[in-house]
Amino acid sequence: MPDVVVIGCGISGAATAWELAKAGRSVTLVDQYGPASMASGWTLAGVRQSGRHPAELPLAMEAVKIWQGLDEALEASTGYTQKGNLRIGLTPEDLPALQVIAKEGQAAGLFVEVLSDAQAVRDIAPALSPAIAGATWCPTDGHADPDATVNAYVSAARQLGVETLFGEAVLSLETRNGRICGVRTASRSIPAGGVVLATGIGGNDLLAPFGCALPVDVRNVTVVRTRPLPPLLSQVLSVASACNSDAACAGRQQLDGAFRFTSGIKVWDGLMREERGRPIVAPTVGSLLETLQSFGDIVPAVRDAEIDAYWCGLVDQTPDALPVLDHVPGVEGLVMARGFSGHGFCLGPLTGKIMAALVQGEVSAVDISAFAFSRFSAPAASSSAPVTLHG
């Protein structure tokens, strides 16, 4: 009998399993597909502090401290690099929003500055088009390899005795006298004293018998990966224009030279299929064309690249675009990390620490009061907040 079952092997679940194993707990890590098979593998994989909600910014800053030593801690490469983030303003009308991002970051002790003309931005990133108005610049932001990171956590967790069950969906949670006592899959029942839900867009079906659900609106983003190009860009870019929502995009150049870039957040048609045991969400032709155009307008050299792959990633958007990091009400021993609204990858190493503490009955070392489940019981929960670009 494991002490804890962790459901979901994205970065949050894998990090939680590793943190629990380090604390001496026996852990079973379960995923319907496998490591990084959904959001954590689909993501742009930005490790971004700038441009976050003020409540989430301190968590991102704390997470970056962990990222800086993560390769050594996991004894594996995550592909993490800390070369900065540029949030692009396309027109002068976009600059006031950039000023707000800089002021909020500075208030939290983060270095963020506004570059108020195209040349100042291109001094940092010469590959960018001159047809921009400015950008925020945060040099301590960065990016990582999503698959390498999650697999590094899984490997390190296994070395500490974590059992992994992949290709096996959890069908129900089992309770006794109001306390979690295990989970059931199609092939087995797994007793456990605690359960962590790190299930992304899924999980409400497991919560339904307890009369609670996380309000999430599933959205998608189109992602394109090119074949490698010579080194052109070391920063992560994002664009959110006040005048042209179709221009929203984000991207970076991977360490192998390939570009990975995305659209803004779109409405999802609900279609998903499986191929070789992995979930596949395909973009529409229109969304793919729009993504190619918008990012090509910012980084013109990408137009000469060959396309290697493209896909859609799904986003578990909450009404306020912030996650839940909390106990599930009414079910002792059940905790949840969901609703990251497309920007949970950076937080993953810290999320693991938070979940490990909560499921063991400890107090989180960082303030997570803004991420309580109970906030959605208020009437304001029915309104939706705008979502910052993912990553």
Image (spheres, grey):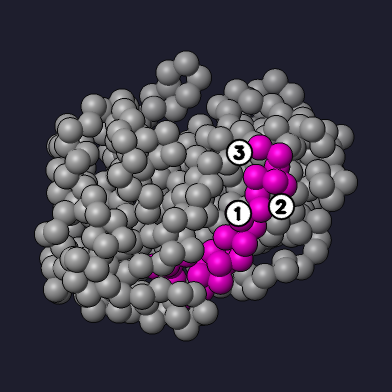
Q: Which residue is mark 2?
A: 334
Of labels 2 and 1, earlier in sequence is 1
| Amino acid type, residue under disc 2 in the picture | Leu
Crowd rating for badge 2 (residues with CA inside 10 Å; few <14, some 14–19, many 20+): many
The foreground one among 12 and 118 is 118
Camera-nearest label, 2 or 1: 1
Looking at the image, residue 258 lies above or below residue 73: above
Marks 2 and 1, Cα distance to the nearest angstrom? 27 Å
Q: Which residue is mark 3?
A: 77
Residue shown at the point (30%, 44%) measured from the top left: 232
User: Picture coordinates of residue 214 (x, y %)?
Assistant: 51, 55
Q: Which residue is mark 1?
A: 67
Marks 3 and 1, Cα distance to the nearest angstrom? 11 Å
Task: Write down the quadrant of residue 390 in the picture.
Answer: bottom left
Task: Write down the quadrant of residue 114 in the picture.
Answer: bottom left
Is disc 1 placed on a helix, strand or loop?
Answer: helix
Magenta-drawn segment: 48-76
User: Picture coordinates of residue 288 (x, y %)?
Assistant: 20, 36
Residue 388 can be seen, yes or no? yes
The foreground one among 200 and 229 is 229
Camera-nearest label, 2 or 3: 3
Is disc 2 placed on a helix, strand or loop?
Answer: strand
Is disc 3 placed on a helix, strand or loop?
Answer: loop
- Marks 2 and 3 close (CB-CB < 8 Å): no
Residue 47 can be seen, yes or no? no
